[in-house]
Amino acid sequence: MILSFPSPEFDDAVAAVCHGSATQETMCALNVLLRRDSIARDEYLMRIELHARLASEPDLFFHSANEVEGAPAFHFEAAKRPRKLGRALALAACFALLATGLRGWWFSRLAARQGATSSAVAMLARAVDARWGQNTPQPTVGTALEPGRLRLESGLAQVVFYSGARVVMEGPAELQLISSMEAVCHAGRLLAEVPPPARGFRLKTAQLNLVDLGTVFGVDATDRQTELHVFKGKVQFFSGTAARRSMSEGQAAVVDGSTPPRFRAASEAAFSPLFELEKLSSAAESVRYDQWRLWSARLNQDPSLVVHLDLQNLGDSDWTLRNASEKSRSVLEATVVGCQRAEGRWPEKQALEFQSVNDRVRLAVPGEFDSLTLSGWVRVQGLDRQFNSLFMCDGFEPGTVHWLIRNDGVLSLTVKGPEQQFQIMASPPVLTLDKFGMWTHLAVVLDGKSRRLIHYVNGCPVAHSMLKLGPPYRFGSAELGNWNALSGPDPAPSLIRNLSGSLDEFELFSRALSEAEVYKLYTEGKPEPGR
Amino acid sequence: MSEDLTGRLDDSSAAQQRFLSLFLRSEREIFRYVAVLVPNVTDAEDIVQQTALALWEKFDAYDPSQPFTPWACRFALNKARQWIERRQRWQALLDHGLAEELAQRRQELQPEFELRLKRLDGCLGKLPQVQRALVQGYYFERLGVEILAERLGRTPAATYKSLQRIRHALQHCLEGRMKPEAP
């Protein structure tokens, strides 16, 4: 191998050396060239210098935090601007809707919308006796948080970043959210837990910048000094002009910025109330629940999500379910008839239980669709009826669909065509006894364009069919967990199709989700962690 | 980077504090000195850490009237040599006196480099968001290329290529030749 300069081969060789992936042959060739050609050697040195500079000057990457500190007021305004615009649009839409008598609905949506704007970087997951500072945001549990400052006067609050990093703070404390991977602790005590996906999470105080390498650590910051305690894993930090240094489990450092850090043993006692909340929330179920809430907030921004019943925050007397989809204007809410409140996939999450022939959730979905995806988390107790409804349109109107489970465990989707035509697309028996009593994700995708239908169980396709009846498909009035046969009183037994089991989430998309997307619905929603 | 060091220096006597203070101030420069010979970041950091331990052992011999960084760099050169001796690949790169030549020439070019690198902050700021995030992930967060590739939905090889292109764009920007715009 012979290298010349300048050449693409030279560029690749230098890059491979930087990345540590160059072969011996490449290195040999580079050695020959660099000894012979002084221009190539200078160019090589310049490239290495740039590479080394990027690797050794963390300040280069703390731009955003520094900017914010320099001009907090300006940044805060800048961060808020998109929301103002969003509000203006929402208000304009609201005035347009006043005429149609939907005012109450819009105002309630507007309130709910406060949280879920797309510039949010975190969520307030939990709070204990939290009192927030005057003239600062007053978030409630479940609120999505945008970049900006949170001032907690007293009590405890837990912020879960969209990256997965979880921070418990104890008032008085001031935390500034920069991004889903970065925050500034201006003052106060906090405890951070950083799971592998959030590796690289950065926290800044007046005296130090730290990068988390997958840990639990505590910070106690004042304007004079920062105490850093590492309880699990590893943290890197740097202060002043010093290079980065690592700290491991059990170590603590006191940093005042002007003298070298003083090291001592980490103390859990100083952070005990924070640990209590962290422990409560780091139970595996709670972590999964939080992850689902974060995912759910983002899913609600999908423009193709027509209906999302997340069954969150149900009151005992609530008989309407808010459609959580942020982009859908066509379906406002669903109505609960009967049904018991039950525990959902996680202890903190609710679900609806269907038992009697009266139990049902009614909703009206206007419009026509070329493709569709239906998805839900159900816990089947038994398959008592010949047909057990998942989601069924009233009666037998042309273009409507019936999604159900047969008593032999077969998933079935019926598309009704014009006149007497219809097509039943069934899976093999998949809801077998071993799945009873377990939370199971069911989905069905109708792709009107390619005329294909796929049934899914727990994210995996279980049956493919060709669709003979093409779009448009429609719903009109429909029911979850039951069926209104429109047959008048005393229906025949085959027309009684109530579900025996619980429902914890339901989605309707106006497009055909890909296999990967359905799998994602399953993995993000499954009760236990892991794949 | 200096984890063992931290452990060793737990109860900090005055000498240790003095050493740490000096070392931490020079550490970035020592790293860049080593990187001229062994540019791969994790390997260079290993060498710097070994250098730190050697420096501490010989700290008694340090003359405070002399600047610390050049003294430390001599140790770093030794440590780098020992490290390279055990690795054939790197020997092939630095053989026949190239190591010394590179170290020497870098010193000569230093003022020019400093001048150019002044713009690095600004050039980084001009990078498109995705590219900036990639550079930050690789150099600052020290994420593996596999993780970065997964984030971007690319192969690791394509991610390495992107990093190469971004550095190329940054270099153009540093030289004032054009805006940073990686293809």
Image: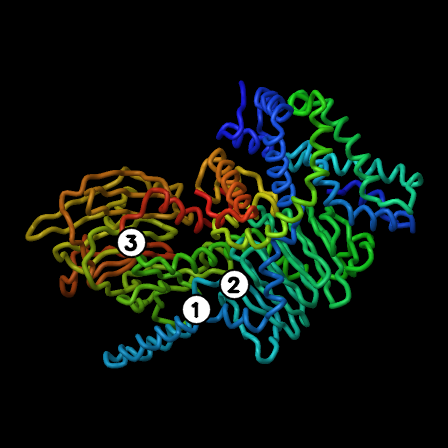
* Dot 1: chain letter: A
Q: Which residue is mark 3?
A: A390
Instruction: Locate residue A21: give its quadrant.
Output: top right
Can you identify the residue that label 1 sits on?
A82
Camera sees residue A337: no
Residue B24, given in percent of the width and then of the height, sits at 78, 48
Q: Residue at x 9, y 48 (%)?
A: A421
Label 1 vs 2, first from the N-terminus:
1
Whole-number angstrom distance, CA of label 3 to CA of label 1: 39 Å
- Color theme of the render: rainbow
Mark closer to the observer (3, 1): 1
Count residues near mark 2 (Cα–Cα under 10 Å), then give few for <14, some for 14-19, many for 20+: many
- Image quadrant of residue A411? top left
Q: B40 or A83: which is nearer to us? A: B40
Q: Which residue occupies 36% across, 54% down? A: A501
Same-chain check, marks 3 and 1? yes
Q: Nearer the viewer, residue A426 or A82?
A: A82
Q: Which residue matches tag 2?
A: A123
Mark nearer the N terminus (3 vs 2): 2
Going by the numbered disc 3, the residue's amino acid type is Leu
Q: What is the spatial separation of the Cα atoms under label 3 and label 2, in whole angstroms? A: 32 Å
